[in-house]
Amino acid sequence: MKFRILRGVEAARLADVVPPPLRRRLPPPLLKHGPYTVLVFPLALDPVRSGAAAKAIARLDEGDSDPVLAFGADFTVDALAILAARGVTALAVGDWHWTDQSYERIRASIASRGRHRG
């Protein structure tokens, strides 16, 4: 899963750099602070899973002192744990509370039904 990393984003610009469905989810206190490092995951139907979260964290500079915000359509519980361990605040459009495993199980179930429809 691709993602963008934006550094030095001032609070006044947050609404300009996040996708429209996430703009209304911006908590007012975030708009009073900054600058931020912002991780923007695509708003695809899939939730951000732990692998994508780990890749994004690995690309952050350890010396960055700016707070980090992550935006996505949804995050698995596993991805949220990885982000939280690094001190990242995650904001999502949905809140389905998937785990990586439960999401993969659902995907596999849907895919197998599609193959049996002949």
Image (cartoon, rainbow, N blue to C red):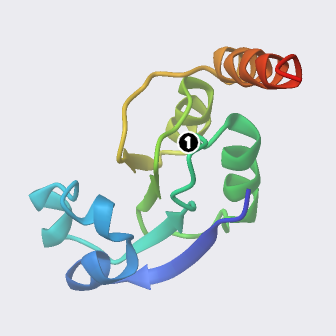
Query: Identity of the amino acid at label 1?
Result: Leu
Q: Classify residue 81 by image quadrant.
A: top right
Q: Which residue corresponds to the image point at 52% horizontal and 65% vertical from the top-left?
A: 40
Residue 21 x, y percent position in the rendering: 30, 61
**Label 1 secondary element:** helix
Q: Classify residue 47 by image quadrant.
A: top right
The residue carrying mark 1 is 83
Question: How many numbered tags mark residues here?
Answer: 1
Q: For this view, does 41 lie left or right of residue 66?
A: right
User: Quick one: 79 or 64, which is closer to the camera?
Assistant: 79
Quadrant of image for the N terminus: bottom right
Residue 69 x, y percent position in the rendering: 42, 59
Q: Which residue corresponds to the image point at 87% horizontal and 16% vertical from the top-left?
A: 116
User: Quick one: 68 or 103, which is closer to the camera?
Assistant: 103
Q: For this view, does 114 lie left or right of residue 29?
A: right
Asked if 92 appears above or below 69 in the picture, the reply is: above
Q: Which residue corresponds to the image point at 22% horizontal and 54% vertical from the top-left?
A: 25
Residue 71 x, y percent position in the rendering: 44, 57
User: Quick one: 61 or 95, which is closer to the camera?
Assistant: 95
Q: State the residue lying farthest toward the front.
A: 118
Q: Residues within 10 Å of mark 1 (few under 14, many from 20)?
A: many
Q: Which residue corresponds to the image point at 30% horizontal and 76% vertical from the top-left?
A: 14
Residue 118 x, y percent position in the rendering: 89, 23
Q: Classify residue 96 by image quadrant.
A: top left
